[in-house]
Image (cartoon, helix red, strand yellow):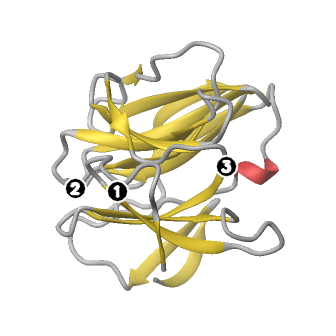
Amino acid sequence: VTVAEVVGQNWRVTGGLAAGEKVIVEGSSKIAPGQTVQAVAVDPRNPGAPRELLKVEGAASPSDISEDGKRLVWIRTVSNRESQINILDLATGKSVRIAPDAKARYDDARFLPDGKGFIWGSERTGFHHLYRYDMDGTLGQAISAGDYNLDKLLAVDAKAGIVYAQSNLDFVGDQQVYAFALDGSTASKPRRI
């Protein structure tokens, strides 16, 4: 994106976005438990008047925005072993918690392009893997599985039905990229890229 002057505490974006696109700024590394996090929407016609969307106690970070630009999935960190996945309706400001397992750690939450579900990472089995969930938090299937950890969700190619993730499965001293079938059929047999 191209930015111009700062308006209050907001940067004015002057280029690099198509109509309807939004920018999410991550700053969670500067947020500590107990701090209040405030998400705001800024109307480009009136950038000096941001609208508060969400106020959260504790560490929180945006994770992804839906294809239609109407919802934001965000993660609230409760502790180093527990987090909560939430969906924020950007029009109403209403936020709903959807992570099904209490006392589990979640990350890498991404909307699926069809709007019917999510992919998110969890250590629910003792190893960090990716799972596909419906919008209400119902588990669909594991996308990855085994006695190893995935380090990072890199990309989702929904048309090809492929999820790309980073791990050190083949060599602990290095990171490799693996492809997994979105339907879970290759969960325990990823293809190294």
- Residues 63 and 152: in front is 152
70 lies above or below 42: above
Tell me the residue at 80%/51% (across/down).
30
- Residue bearing the label numbered 2: 113
Label placed on residue 132: none
Q: Marks 3 and 2: which is nearer the front?
A: 3
Looking at marks 3 and 1 on the same chain, the residue that comes earlier in the sequence is marked by 1
Instruction: Kindly check if marks 2 and 1 are in contact, taking CB atoms under 8 A apart as contact.
Output: no
Question: Please, what is the three-letter code of the amino acid marked with disc 2?
Answer: Pro
Q: Residue 164 vs residue 30: left or right? A: left
Local crowd size for mark 3, using a 10 Å CA cut-off: few (<14), some (14–19), many (≥20): some
Q: Nearer the viewer, residue 188 or 23?
A: 188
Helix, strand or loop for disc 3:
loop
Q: Which residue is mark 3?
A: 148
Label 2 crowd bin: few (<14), some (14–19), many (20+), radius 10 Å: some
- Looking at the image, tell me whether mark 3 or mark 2 is earlier in sequence order: 2
Label 3, label 1: how far apart the Cα atoms are: 45 Å
Q: Which residue is mark 1?
A: 43
The image shows residue 89 at horizontal and vertical percentages of: 31, 34
Q: Give the amino acid at mark 1.
A: Asp
Alpha carbon separation for disc pair 3 and 2: 28 Å
Alpha carbon distance from label 2 to label 1: 25 Å
Q: Position of residue 43 (x, y in %)?
A: 34, 56
Q: Quadrant of residue 70?
A: top left
Identified at 34% across, 64% down, the residue is 44
Q: Which residue occupies 50% across, 49% down?
A: 63
Is residue 170 shown above or below 69? below
